[in-house]
Image (spheres, helix red, strand yellow):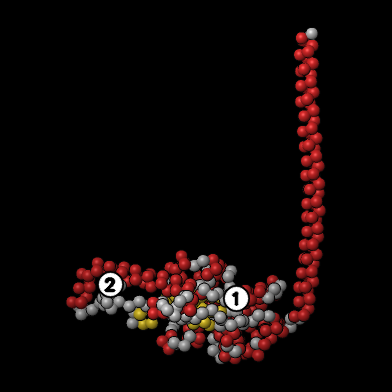
């Protein structure tokens, strides 16, 4: 119940959709658990459940710039009181961010510093409750002592950094921090070093994704689509898609629907078509959706888009011409105003001279 409420709250928060699609599913505990199980080759994560995942992104928002609003931080319960932190960086652009490893390092240091402070607070609280602890120990209950950074045995939690790259090209950024530092060959042992995982939907075939038989595989399959023609290539998986959606809770269907809204808007489909497709997804009707896509006349649609663009260009050209004419008239008006100002100054000068002459004549007249 708690997870459903959390996911419902995520769905209502429209701000997550403005920069891309990746954060939609990384913010969802069910989809995040599927992602870790199926696409990260770490055995300890194979048994992760949605209830083991806590979104703690808001604790680290001071580090997020407007370009990094899609990034998320998760705290994952591994059991026995141990935790793993997951940093997911969402790269929507086809252009590679070459400084991503430095951004990951900032997140990691911030998380460890925050964890250190959290353990210190927990230790202080434990000391205040020492009397209760003593009573519990006398009753046969032993409370595990909270270690802080001043203790020799204190350990910081592991952090798993992941870059989810939606681009079709190859990820060419450095995978190790030392490769971003000059003179690294000389100062190698003094440079903190780590690597990170890059998960790219285009590294998986459609068959590999659909064989996962879950919503995350379907979303990553959809994430690969770049054009209307691509939809026809996945229509062979209708039965698999239908089976997945039949088993999906409504809040997951809503997430897939919003994901598709972003995708279809990128493809410049008419809004009424998008609304119709999305409403069918919410009903778990993906196969019928793809049949509609197959009936889309792509060349005709492109021709219509080109025609509309040509009309827009003509209107813009007409507006530019009118603006040019207005600018020309304004220049003429400015020139005329300048001539008027010059004439006014000339008249004022002549008037001044006449007054001087008149004053002189008055003086001569008075002397006579």
Q: Residues within 10 Å of mark 2 (few under 14, many from 20)?
A: few
- In-image side of 135 versus 49 (left or right): left
Q: How many marks?
A: 2
The percent position of residue 163, horizontal first and vertical second, equals 51, 78
Q: State the residue in front, 43 or 152.
A: 152
Q: Earlier in the sequence, mark 2 or mark 1?
A: 1
Q: State the residue in front, 210 or 7.
A: 210
Instruction: Label 2, secondary structure: give it.
Output: loop
In the picture, the disc for residue 150 is 2
Q: Residue at x 79, y 20 (%)?
A: 357
In the picture, the disc for residue 95 is 1
Q: Residue at x 76, y 18 (%)?
A: 359
Residue 197 visible? The answer is: yes
Tag 2 and tag 1, C-beta contact below 8 Å: no
Task: Answer with the quarter of the image where residue 11 lies.
Answer: bottom right
Residue 2 visible? The answer is: no
The percent position of residue 247, horizontal first and vertical second, equals 54, 85
- In-image side of 173 versus 337 (left or right): left
Vertical relation: 323 (above or below) 88:
above
- In-image side of 8 versus 133 (left or right): right
Q: Residue at x 20, y 77 (%)?
A: 137
């Amino acid at each position: 119940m708690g997870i459903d409420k959390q996911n419902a709250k995520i769905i209502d928060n429209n701000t997550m959709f403005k920069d891309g699609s990746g954060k939609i599913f990384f913010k969802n505990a069910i989809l995040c658990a599927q992602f870790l199980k199926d696409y990260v080759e770490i055995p300890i994560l194979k048994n992760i459940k949605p209830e083991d995942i806590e979104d703690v992104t808001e604790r680290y928002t001071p580090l997020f710039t407007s370009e990094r609003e899609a990034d998320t931080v998760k705290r994952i319960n591994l059991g026995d009181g141990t935790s793993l932190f997951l940093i997911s960086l969402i790269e929507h652009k086809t252009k590679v961010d070459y400084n991503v490893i430095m951004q990951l390092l900032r997140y990691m240091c911030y998380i460890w510093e925050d964890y250190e402070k959290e353990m210190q607070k927990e230790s202080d609280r434990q000391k205040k409750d020492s009397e209760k602890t003593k009573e519990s120990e006398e009753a046969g209950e032993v409370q595990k002592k909270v270690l802080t950074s001043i203790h020799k045995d204190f350990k910081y939690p592991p952090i798993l950094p992941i870059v989810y790259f939606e681009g079709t090209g190859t990820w060419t950024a450095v995978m190790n921090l030392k490769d971003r530092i000059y003179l690294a060959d000389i100062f190698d042992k003094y440079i903190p070093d780590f690597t990170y995982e890059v998960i790219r939907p285009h590294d998986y075939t459609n068959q590999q994704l659909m064989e996962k038989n879950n919503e995350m595989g379907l979303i990553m399959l959809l994430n690969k689509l770049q054009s209307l023609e691509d939809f026809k290539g996945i229509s062979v998986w209708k039965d698999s898609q239908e089976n997945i959606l039949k088993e999906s809770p409504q809040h997951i269907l809503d997430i897939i629907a919003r994901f598709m809204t972003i995708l279809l808007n990128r493809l410049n489909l008419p809004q009424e078509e998008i609304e119709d497709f999305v409403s069918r997804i919410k009903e778990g009707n993906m196969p019928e959706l793809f049949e509609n896509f197959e009936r889309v006349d792509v060349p005709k649609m492109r021709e219509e888009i080109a025609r509309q663009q040509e009309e827009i260009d003509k209107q813009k050209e007409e507006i530019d011409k009118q603006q040019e004419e207005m600018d020309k008239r304004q220049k003429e008006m400015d020139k005329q105003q300048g001539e008027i100002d010059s004439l006014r100054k000339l008249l004022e000068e002549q008037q001044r001279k006449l007054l001087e002459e008149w004053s002189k004549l008055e003086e001569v007249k008075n002397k006579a």
